[in-house]
Amino acid sequence: MSEHLPILIVVCPLAAALLVPLAARLSPRLARGIAIAAPAGALVCAVAALRVALDRGPWHYHLGGWAPPWGIEYVVDPLGGGMATLVALLALLVAIYAGPYLRARSAFRAAIFDSLFLLLTSGLLGITLTGDLFNLYVFLEISSLAAYALLASSGERAVVATFRYLLIGTIAASFYLLGLGYLYALTGTLNMGDLAIRLAEAGGGSAMTVGVVLIVVGLAIKMAVFPLHGWMPDAYTYAPPPVTMFIAAVMSKVSAYALLRVLFFVLPATGAVETALAVLSWVATGGVLAGSILALAQTDVRRMLVYSSVGQMGYVVLGLSLGNATALTGALLHVVGHAVAKGCLFGAVGSLPRQTMQAEIAGFAGASRRAPLTMAAFTVAALSLVGLPPTAGFFSKWYLLQGALEADAWFFAAVLLMSSLLSAVYFFRVIERIYFADDPGAADPGASRHRTKPSLRMLGPVITLGAAVLLIGILNGRLVTAVIRHALPEL
Amino acid sequence: MSVVAWGQLQYVLAAVLLLIGLYGMLVRTNLVRKLMAMNVMQVAVIVFFISLAVRAGGTPPIEVESPSAGSDVLYANPLPHALMLTAIVVSVSTTGVALALLIRIHRRFDTLDEADVLDRLRQ
């Protein structure tokens, strides 16, 4: 068994996705059990495979025994294995978190939801592990299709928003595939390791430029990098809470991983890639500022969080485009920290009982009295996105700032600080309401009877994520030396 | 002097199809037409890949036992065909999901015009 760990990471949720609807006919509890056990299994496999990769170097697994470049290979290296661990961990927490949401639905609908969720998880895990660019496209589409169905599963607003996301997401995937076609035409291979060697030999040329541009634009749309983020706010705001929690936390991060993988591990660091990185640095600057300013303008907390994601993904892209080891360390730490913090924030917002489709900031008045633990986790995660010590966000921004200074990019350093200030403004607006505003329901003694205590299954994942934000911050040195340093490309 | 050689015409076709698709998705207001434009765009990618597989004078990539031909039979590259089979499956699934969404939109709003749908949502 242990020699098949890399494929088991993907097979666990994939097989469970097929089993869950069948098991639901026998017993809905069994189906829920499988839906939670599968990400747990994937997490165990991912951690085990990552440990092997850290001890003995990248683990190349040949599917069906076919050696690359003819066969498809999975590669667990510290970067891919680390991303897989992150995705599996969040999938497990969200699978638990989804319990109370699904209890209100019929057993059949709950099983379909779980099945789609597991497909989404296996798609994202596949992207992190595959060593083949076309296989990456297939996993990208598996995860996207599952995401469309999940995002559309709550009301007509969600359906309209998802249809637009589907069109834009397909443009992105087609661009990626077309760019891949150019690289294939140049080299005749699709294996990442093989491509890296052959592209370095083939040199630049206009075909490679076109390929690079198409792939970067395609992945940038999937990442919702400013100004290609237009599809995101509506699609995420109207989706069911567990879906938004998972997708907002990891989906754009996995696309960011794919971009990092292609730009630094596959394409040679010459002409077209350098230009692409230079353009990305300015795009990221725009994204960091625009995301923060747009977040400031929102009155719905979920929309504010989505726009804050646009800004936060800007940091990641900025780290990539600076391209030195410190900045890349910062970008990877930010991917981890932001995934955990955004999951926590959306989880906290989604766990509050709500009558309307809106989550207005005003509605958070006095929320600390109603849900003290949830709001504490929300606050910790928000502080991480602002970048206050000792949370994860402070340290990733610190690395990014150092990376910017190493590259003599003073302007970007100034932008980083500026946008931290802006995010402090929009988050403290909410935190102030939570802790210092009067609870409007407190005056009405009848209202307290309607207050439902948040379910432990919702509270648990949110608090775990909140604690993880602090832990990643405090233990950031160990995380960097143990995993992230080994995940960096050779520069 | 022509900019493009005749042998490269299929790449021009792919580029034209891609632009028609993107144009349709941007300009059309009917959601079904947008979806059809999306399919045109996906076909462009398929045409592009299949064009890569062509070898002048090549046979279909099927192993034939002919003693006279020897070992060097020139055949079309089968890999892009295999890749595009997968891409076609992806395209069909995407279209299926999109049509399911359109049915729900039509049931709720009784229209498939984007502007009308957005108007209704704003009310």
Image (cartoon, coloured by chain):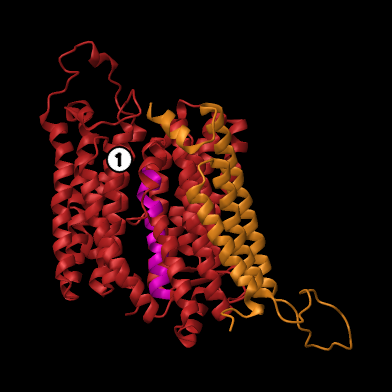
Label 1's element?
Answer: helix
Q: Colour of chain A?
A: red
Q: Is residue A440 above or below residue B79?
A: above
Label 1 Cα crowd, 10 Å radius (few <14 / some 14-19 / many 20+): many
Which of A130 and A415 lies nearest the eye of the viewer? A415
The reply to whether residue A170 is in sight is: yes
Q: Is residue A462 left or right of residue B50?
A: left
Q: What quarter of the picture does the C terminus of chain B occupy?
A: top left
The segment highlighted magenta reads A245-265
Rendered location of residue A411, percent (x, y): 16, 67
**Which residue is label 1 attached to?**
A303
Q: Colour of chain B?
A: orange
Rendered location of residue A147, percent (x, y): 48, 46
Q: Is residue A347 above or below residue A287?
A: above
Residue drawn at point x = 51 percent, y = 83 percent: A198
Residue drawn at point x = 64 percent, y = 63 percent: B84
Rendered location of residue A401, percent (x, y): 17, 66
Which of A339 and B25 lies nearest the eye of the viewer? B25
Outermost residue toward the left? A436
Which of A110 and B104 lies nearest the eye of the viewer? B104
